[in-house]
Amino acid sequence: MRDLLSRRGLAAFSMMTLLTTAGAGCADDGGGDPGAPPTVSNLALTPETVTAGSLVTLSGTMRFSDPDGDVALLVSELELPGGATQPGPETPVAGAAGITTGDVPFQLALQTSAPGALTVRVWLVDTKGNPSNTLEAVVTVE
């Protein structure tokens, strides 16, 4: 699979770890109220430049606000040079139940291939399936 991805100039990636602020478990009031979606801001992702043909770990953090306190998942997507997208895993946000504002630190493992600009997109989803706005950062592959 890695050879196929490399030949097409694609990059494989996966979510490695995800930590959040205090708390434990996931909350759901069980009612029919769709609730309010979370909002995210202040995305920081490092390093901003990586070497082609290497396995790298990107470290990131973003701020969230969710009036319902029911953030459940961090979702990611990678846009490759040329515009093709590759979905990342949906990773549970541990410790977010009942938390209405906080920071979500995370790490992404990336197998780079061809040089170019990779756009990393991240967002949160709450227990009712409401997605937040999407944040993005560009990583340069040299």
Image (cartoon, rainbow, N blue to C red):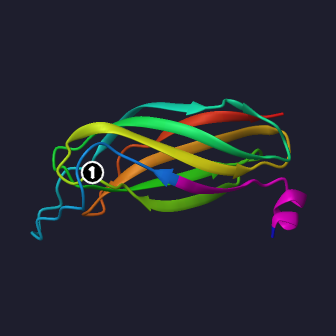
- Which residue corresponds to the image point at 82% horizontal and 64% vertical from the top-left? 2
Image position of 139 with respect to 12: above or below: above
**Quadrant of the rendered structure where residue 57 is?**
top right
Q: Where is 87 relative to 102, above or below?
A: below
Q: Residues within 10 Å of mark 1 (few under 14, many from 20)?
A: many
**Residue type, numbered disc 1:** Ala
In front: 39, or 52? 52
x and y percentages locating residue 22 in the rendered image: 25, 45
Q: Is residue 90 left or right of residue 129?
A: right
Q: Which residues are magenta?
A: 2-16
Quadrant location of the N terminus in the rendered image: bottom right
**How far from the left and from the top, in percent, is residue 92?**
39, 60
The answer to which of 22 and 133 lies nearer the viewer is 22
- Say whether residue 6 is magenta: yes
Q: Residue at point 82% right, 37% down?
A: 51
Quarter containing the C terminus: top right
Residue 62 located within the stretch drawn in magenta? no
Residue 3: percent from the left, percent from the top? 88, 65
Residue placed under numbered mark 1 in the picture: 96
Dot 1 lies on which element? loop
Residue 60 image position (x, y, % from top left):
52, 37
